[in-house]
Image (spheres, rainbow, N blue to C red):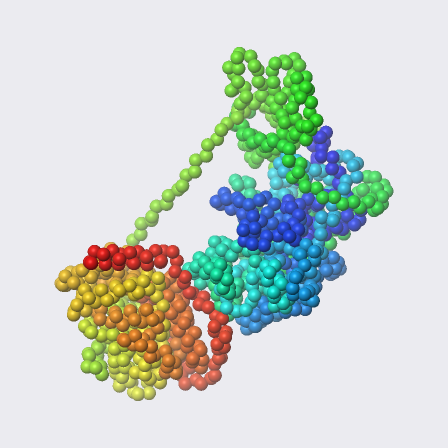
Amino acid sequence: MEKQAGIEQRADDRGDDYDAIVVGSGYGGSVAACRMSTAGIKVCLLEKGRRWKAEDFPTDSWKMMSAVRYENRNLSIRFGPEDALFQKDSLAAVACGLGGGSLVNAGVMVPTPIRARRNPKWPKEWERDWDICESSAAAMLRIQSSSVKFPIAKVMGEIAEGEFEESIQSSVKLSVKFDAEEPPSNPPKLEQTSSCFACGNCLAGYVNQNLRPYHNILKPDGISRKRRWRVYINEIDYITSDWVILSAGVLGTTEILFRSQMRGLRLPDTLGSGFSCNGNTLAYVAGSAAPVNGYGLNRKQLSEIPYQDRPGPSISSSHTSSLGFTIQSAILPRAYPYMLFEGITTYTWPTGHRFFQGIVDRLKRFLGLRLSQSIILNAMGYDESDGKIMLDKDTDKICFHPPQDPLLPRKIIAFQKLTKKLGGILFMSRYRSTAVHLLGGCNASSDSSGGVCNHKGQVFDPKTPAAVHSGLYVCDASLIPCSVGINPSLTIATAAEHASRFLVQDILEYKNKISPGSAAADQNQFSVTAKNLENDNASTVLIKETMRGYVGGMPCTVHLKMKMQSQNLESFDKRNWFTGEPHPLLRGKAGGYVVFRAIEKEKLHIIDGEMDMCVVDCRTPYTQYMRYRLLLAAASGSRYILEGKKIMNPCHFALHAWRETTTLHVTFNKVAPIGSTDTMLNLKGELRTLVRTYILQIPRGTRENFTVTDSYDKSYPSSIVDDIRTADGFIIRCRHWRNPSLLNRDKLLSPILLLNGYTMESYWLPTEPQDLVRTLLDEGHEVWLLQTRLHPLNPANNATIEDVGKYDIPAAIGKILEVHGPSTKIHVVAHCAGGLAIHIALMGGHVSATHIASLSCTNSSMFFKLTAVATIKMWLPLVPVSMAILGEKKILPLMEKSKGSSRHRLLKFIARCLPRYERCSCKECEVLSGIFGNAFWHENVSPSLHQWLITHSATNLPMSAFPHLRRICNSRYIVDSNGNSSFLIHPERMAISTLYISGGRSLLVTPETSFLANKYRKLHQPGFRHERVVVDGFGHSDLLIGEKSHEKVFPHIISHIRLAEQEGNDSTPRKKYSKEALDWADDPDREYRDFGSWFFALAIIFFFLLLHALLV
């Protein structure tokens, strides 16, 4: 947009003559255009997008992709049509089409909350007539609510209760006509009705019949005179008017003003400030078992499903929390490409399974099976409105920094709670703010120091604080100075109503001043026309050219876009060519910019350019000229004229043709302001046409060096080792610690029994400053560490995990009861195989739950779900082959220096060759991870502990229990040594409180293990406290042996034990869990095996087949 000051009117202007031009046709622009046209003002409404009819909107994913334009300024990626319905710009999704945001925002109309209107940034002048304007806007939009409560509203109403501190469920009013009496069969064609079908496809596009902006375009009266403003359609073409109303949306309006500022328009420094995303946070829940009917319907389904059972309008459920935000659920339109939501533009909670979720849904759709349900969740609240919109000068694209949102963590927690209730997977935007309700950027304020516009929408001229640019208005969401916390459509329309009252009055007064009586005469003129400006370009030739050189001895670069018009091509008489008249395709207009840093720091933009590719001077009839005349505008307000000429002389046998056709002789002059006596700039030089080559360089990073700190040297508390004989005659050991300083307590805390996993020590870690034994001693507990028959210090040649649960654990508990008395209760902490064994002991009836105070298990439970690699290892006959290689001696020495048989060496060689997640330079660790799989992420374990584990802890590996462990892994729950399921049928034997902890970065056992156990316990023992925790960043054993375990894992165990100590014999009834609600819930930390996991698994299969071929 360009102000006419100092610019001459071109003789070949478009001939359009309008009183006002409205740029943008959304809620703001349509209201303004409607009010002006009703008053008899000649209005031109400009819309970047095309007119969408009901039948034009996409109905499937492929059509949807053709209706989307995506731009990523960081990757320099742009695809999709310029007039696409959905526009992805920076981090915001906006609509493009006749009707603006009303095409895709589902028509939700909510009055502006009092909290927003009491914001200090809210203009006081608005409050004088806000309620009146709001009523007027509501009447125009004909808002109403549906009398039908649709399925998604019912489900959300049921599950949302209690998930917020306080929540209010409100009915959603829409600018939509409802007709619940519509017959369920043979629905009318979309273009023949304005009633809501309740199909749920609003977000894929719908025509709001209450907002018809194309009815407000009036024909000009043909009276031509010089106007105050130019509105540029592109870099070359423009139309003129006395009044310009910018309603192109937050990003569009702000970008227009930024570009106008670069061309010399004075604007406040606050332009782009005060930007708000309305506290928006979007999420997508997939794979839910709840009957939310979250997918939009196709035409066939409309004839089969009764009105009340359909999804309803896209948004029909709204819940406002006392925490300051509102969550609305939305239907996923049938046309949306779900894969975009399921991992491509989102991250998941829980992580790791976005790809397979999409594949499973696609397979179900292909096979005609019932799809799992999905919905969209949108949270709106009150952000700080301190975001910033900018025009990136390097990429020439609009971008923004989102505002701070203090409620974002609470919204995410609320999403996670709702996802747990619904069951499924939560997909959230990768960006901190996902903007669908943009506000601000041209904020309304009392003067230019606080905003860009006054309360009327007039744009400030910063020359003086309250001065405005005559005839320049803003009338859209960019006026709103703060977040409103709800859907802002009605707020935008209300602000437009307020501004339009002053706008219409100003235009009519101005017209009467210029031509008295014209305003009254116009009242009877009301003619409508629609014009596609793109048709004007149907017969044009576009040329791009870059020229570089020196002007006045200073470097200068000109980037030109030339448009050669050919409207009069058919009427052109070729005979005139010989008389000197140029061909129409050789004459046109030019746009672009000039870089001349020595004169202006910023770009000089061409606001008016003419060119003639073939000029003949009668004095030199054989010489041909190319002439350019460019009017340049600088951000400083200065104006320049660049005139150039190419001379093509046919003499000298065209020896100088190359130089003449590529050299532009230029003069560069500064336009003198009116009344100025300064000496004007007058430079001369030459520019040459160049061919530029761009080379893309890919930087490569280097890995930083790191040093390992020395191990923590601290004397370990003394302990006593007891030898205990089990019922089957095997001798096990139990090491226990006691804190002498706590013996004088009035009430001693219950002792704790620690159960290790298979072979590796997890609790007693002398190299670590804060292991679990030390932590429990500091709490005041006596600690007992059981070394079973599977422990490397006293391994048994023939043993099973069932033997540990049947004999070893009862013997250890008997020893503790012998020391402390038969009424003592014991806290049990178990890991991996130790967790399997304690569940066998309890559910097998070998240990009474009356002796157990609480149970905490890490990566273990009565269920045992493995990762892809571990599953394949257990599924293949690797264990039977290993047992056959070992023969009778089933204890494998792991130390590299230890003497072993040839069978042992062969098995260790095979184990080192197997694929795994991480490799290690330690051969002992390689053998252990080859047999089990990686037991921990090396980055989580200190080097000193790693060395101690290999040299002192895991020195021997008793393999005899592997066949039993394989049966458990393949069954995925505890079974006896013969593979019989005889434990899960006795949930009544586990009448205790439980805590199940899983690592969020699985190596062996997946978080589904703890999820199923927690669900099983809540269902069968609802009278006890049951907790489940997934700790991000940890794998398997590193939950207990990691350097950060005392910060991230141990507090959960300590808290669980403390609560158990406080509860004691508390018989307070607890909440009972509904089986249906538990069935809805899905594991929020479930892992779909990623590509890498299955790649390793297939590599193991290939290795086994190769080994089999070599041996056979």
Nearest the viewer among 55 and 134 is 55
- Which residue is located at x 70 percent, y 58 percent? 194
Q: Residue at x 63, y 46 (%)?
A: 49
How many dots with numbers? 0
Indicate left or right for 831 with 409 as reference: left
Q: Is 577 on the left or on the right of 19, as rendered? A: left
Position of residue 1024 in the picture relative to residue 55 (left or right)? left
Nearest the camera: 668 or 97? Answer: 97
* Residue name at image x 56 percent, y 31 percent: 544
Asked whether residue 724 is in view, the answer is yes
Q: Residue furthest top?
A: 652
Image quarter for residue 200? bottom right
When asked about the image quadrant of residue 856, the answer is bottom left
Horizontal arrangement in the rendering, residue 1083 relative to residue 200 (left or right): left
| Residue 506 locus on image (x, y percent) | 78, 46
Is residue 669 in sight in this rendering?
A: no
Q: Is residue 272 above or below residue 597?
A: below
Identify which residue, 614 or 714, lies in the foreground. Answer: 614
Location of residue 889 with respect to 617 vertically, above or below: below
Residue lying at the far front of the rendered structure? 186
Is 779 rendered above or below residue 32?
below
Q: Quadrant of the N terminus?
A: top right
Which image quarter holds the C terminus? bottom left
Answer above or below: position of 797 versus 498.
Answer: below
Residue 61 placed where, x, y %?
54, 53
Measuring 31% from the left and 80% from the top, which residue is drawn there?
841
- Spot occupied by residue 808 in the image (x, y as percentages of width and height): 25, 79
Residue 21 rendering spot, x and y as whole percentages: 72, 43
